[in-house]
Amino acid sequence: MKIAIHHAPHSFSERWIEYCKEKGIPYKIVNAYDSDIVKQVEDCDAFMWHHHHSNYKDALFAKQLLYSLETGGGKKCFPDFHSGWHFDDKVGQKYLLESVGAPLVPSYVFYTKKEALSWIDRTAFPKVFKLRGGAGAANVRLVHSKYEAKRLVRRAFGRGFPQFNRWGYFTDNLKKWRQGRTPFINVCKGIARLFIGSEFAHFHAPEKGYAYFQDFIPDNKYDIRVIVIGNKAFAIKRMCRPDDFRASGSGNIIYDRSEIDLRCVEKSFDIATKLKTTCVAMDWVRTPADEWLVVELSYGFAMHGYDDCPGYWTDDMQWHEGKFNPQGWMVEEMLK
């Protein structure tokens, strides 16, 4: 077994390479951006690429390349098709989770302005408005009224929304700096972004032609994120940002095992099995009726944000205390 790895700084590939060296697993570094990438991996049995939603080149073709190598080339891939096709696509995740009967936060998508406006007149608020893509709570807004919702819908079916929210990026960094959670240099970067857009937004057209809403689940001061890799899972509790309903991207993490509701872990294993994923992260919120609902999925996660997890569960719900290497598990999945 020989593994081809696309290497990028600060990605999973750093630990994949380290693990292969440590375990004596044959590997080679390849460049997914090269035109001859298919030829580069001919002598390999697997291909691993931690592609990222905010890299415009990755967003253009990563899923297509991985699918081609997995289906046509007969390679084992990370992420494989089941784990990665819905990455950074909240609308796709809606359909997928509904199809397997997962307990999804009630979600609504519309492809005409008329239908969206009609629904707004009949529904209750607040609601959460989202674009298909974005992580760390980017492109997510709490909508308090019909007026706000209709304004967003008209824009969604008009000029659309830029792929990068300049004002949101600035205000988020400013708020974090005031709370002592980020250096002032990031506020300066936010100011610069007000005038100079991101490379991703430059090369990708505005999001428009649909409107996506979810029910707002009240009284949540945190969410639970569970990551399932093969038959193992680990979890964190993410506290919401101050004066905000969003937990994703807050950086305020609790690792204490006793803070994790085991129902989230059990349900995550069940959903991962139904979705046939090798790696999936699920975000859970609790309703006032003490029911846990999935908000969204991802195959990726912030690598260093989980290094302090005290242990993990196996799918028989047995707890295993101690440090572990999720990226090593990913490599092991390629060897099966």
Image (cartoon, grey):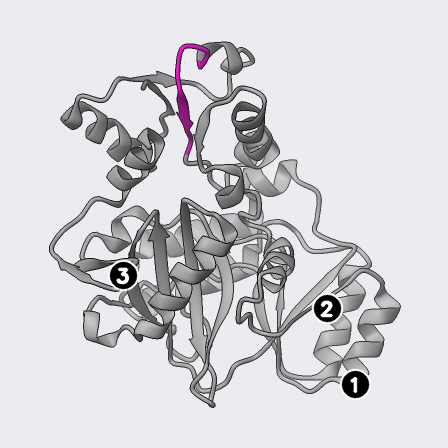
The residue most toward the right is 114
| Above or below, comparing residue 217 to residue 273 in the picture | below
Q: Check disc 1: other Cα within 10 Å, few if <14, some if 14-19, many if 20+.
A: few
Residue 150 found in image quarter? bottom right
Residue at left 43%, top 70%? 284
| Residue 44 falls within the magenta-colored stretch | yes
Q: Who is closer to the viewer here, 91 or 277? A: 277
Please provide the residue range marked out in magenta. 41-49
Residue at left 17%, top 58%? 311
Q: Who is closer to the viewer here, 224 or 152? A: 224
Q: Position of residue 13 (x, y in %)?
A: 32, 32
Q: In the structure shown, which secondary structural element does the residue marked by tag 1 occupy?
A: helix
The residue most toward the left is 322
Classified by dominant secondary structure, the portion drawn in magenta counts as loop
Q: Position of residue 72 (x, y in %)?
A: 58, 21
Work out whether residue 231 can be spotted: yes
Label 3: which residue?
Answer: 316
Identify the disc placed on residue 169.
Answer: none
Q: In the structure shown, which secondary structural element does the residue marked by tag 2 occupy?
A: helix
Mark 1 against mark 2, which lies toward the viewer? Answer: 1
Considering only order in the chain, which callout, 1 or 3, is on the residue closer to the N terminus? 1
The alpha-carbon separation of the residues under discs 3 and 2 comes to 45 Å
Question: At label 3, which amino acid type do we have?
Answer: Asp
